[in-house]
Image (cartoon, grey):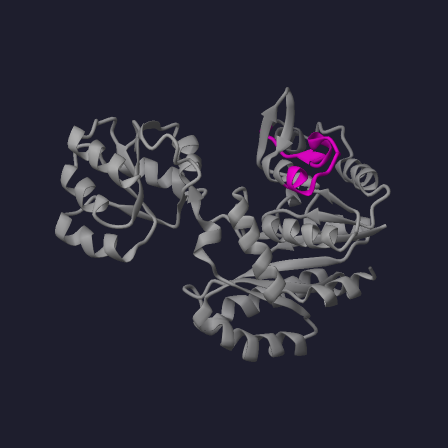
């Protein structure tokens, strides 16, 4: 049974998006694809069962008939962690994962396995990336995300790629570099990629940064903040590419508002001046904090412009922190984002070489 384990070295690297994108490409080529997310640290409950949200989304998009609770055999909860720490755990987690892997792979040409948010995730319960790929004897494709603002000349990309190679050794079949700013693409392709390949690290693709793919929908902000919708109930699918905080004077805020397109502005419900300024620029959503109702003039103007106005009880800082926790994660729930990502893979991922190296 062929398998590909897709992991990453840091959170929000685009691992789920890549797993789904490769799976769809394989299906389009006529391959029967299975999917498994062996370990989940983001559980949610549906129908009395604990599921993983990402795994359920991938299952639906790939059209798999496997029950969603079978796609994430090990869900790390507080209770499971307590059992591990107290030495009372009676389950063989590796065996459970192996059994699920065998089941989802029945009659499939390949099973895509989506690893944790980082290579260290799951160490405490013995189901980290290295343990799993050794036990299951599967090749690994690692997503390495660009962090140019933190490192000199793409050094973080090189460090992360070489660290992955050191940890996984021959099990690492290669990497995909993700979220590379367009102004850095030439440097990464002509300098970083040849260097990495000279170190024995195959680079299957260099994906450019696209803020649209990391945008949040208005609906995701509504759900995260449990917000009351004052205008724009029909705008849940509209996308937000930037977040801006209106806690300063209008004079200070306007230049930033003008630079940021398709943004959500977080400000107090009593800051009519900031709200009016935001509405005169490219604003998708106003998040008004402190449960302070805006004026009828603001609501009327927002309706005219097609801007969603949300009301929340949180302080501005609290609301921003809660949304920041999910902002920047590549979510492909909107069809137009999925199509855009697929087009990016077609242009920038060496799919033919990946398939050849997998023996498919």
Q: Say above or below: 146 vs 91.
A: below
Look at the image and tell me in which quarter the C terminus lies: bottom right
Q: Nearer the viewer, residue 312 or 215?
A: 215
Locate residue 319, reporting x and y percent.
Answer: 33, 36
The x and y percentages for residue 226 are 39, 27
Q: Residue at x 41, y 42 (%)?
A: 238
Range covered by the magenta-colored residues: 58-78
* Residue 102, image quadrant: top right
Q: Residue at x 67, y 67 (%)?
A: 350
Q: Quick check: can you spot residue 9?
A: no
Q: How many marks?
A: 0
The x and y percentages for residue 106 are 85, 41
Q: Is residue 127 left or right of residue 358?
A: left
> Where residue 191 sits: x, y (%)?
55, 79
Towards the viewer: 237 or 81: 237
Nearest the viewer among 195 and 90 is 195
**Residue at the image point whose x is 69% and y is 54% from the top:** 25
Residue 75 is at least partly visible in this image: yes
Q: Nearer the viewer, residue 133 or 89?
A: 133
Horizontal relation, residue 266 to residue 298: left or right: right
Tell me, yes or no, whether the highlighted magenta stretch contains residue 75.
yes
Residue 153 magenta-highlighted: no
Direction front: furthest residue: 304
User: Which residue is located at x 20 percent, y 44 percent?
Assistant: 247
């Amino acid at each position: 049974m062929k398998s590909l384990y897709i992991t990453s070295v840091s959170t929000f690297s685009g691992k789920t998006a890549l797993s789904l994108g490769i799976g769809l490409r394989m299906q389009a080529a006529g391959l029967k694809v299975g999917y498994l997310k062996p370990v989940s640290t983001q559980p949610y409950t549906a129908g009395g069962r604990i599921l993983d949200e990402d795994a359920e989304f991938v299952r639906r998009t790939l059209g798999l008939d496997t029950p969603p609770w079978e796609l994430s055999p090990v869900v790390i909860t507080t209770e499971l962690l307590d059992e591990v720490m107290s030495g009372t755990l009676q389950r063989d987690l590796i065996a459970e994962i192996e059994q699920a892997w065998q089941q989802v792979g029945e009659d499939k040409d390949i099973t895509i396995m989506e690893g944790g948010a980082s290579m260290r995730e799951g160490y405490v319960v013995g189901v980290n990336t290295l343990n799993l790929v050794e036990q299951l004897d599967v090749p690994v494709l690692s997503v390495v995300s660009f962090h140019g603002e933190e490192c000199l000349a793409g050094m973080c990309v090189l460090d992360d790629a070489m660290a992955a190679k050191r940890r996984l050794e021959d099990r690492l079949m290669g990497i995909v570099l993700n979220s590379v700013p367009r102004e850095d693409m030439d440097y990464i392709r002509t300098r970083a990629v040849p260097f990495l390949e000279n170190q024995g690290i195959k680079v299957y693709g260099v994906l450019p940064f696209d803020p649209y793919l990391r945008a949040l929908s208005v609906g995701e902000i509504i759900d995260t903040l449990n917000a009351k919708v004052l205008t724009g109930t029909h705008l849940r699918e509209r996308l937000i590419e930037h977040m801006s905080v209106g806690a300063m004077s209008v004079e200070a805020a306007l230049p930033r508002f003008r630079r940021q397109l398709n943004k959500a502005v977080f400000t107090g419900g009593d800051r009519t001046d900031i709200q009016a300024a935001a509405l005169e620029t490219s604003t998708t959503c106003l998040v008004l904090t402190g449960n302070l109702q805006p004026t009828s003039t603001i609501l009327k103007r927002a309706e005219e412009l097609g801007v969603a106005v949300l009301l929340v009880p949180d302080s501005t800082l609290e609301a921003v922190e809660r949304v920041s926790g999910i902002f920047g994660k590549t979510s492909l729930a909107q069809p137009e984002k999925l199509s855009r990502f697929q087009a990016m893979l077609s242009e920038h991922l060496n799919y033919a070489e990946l398939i050849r190296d997998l023996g498919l």
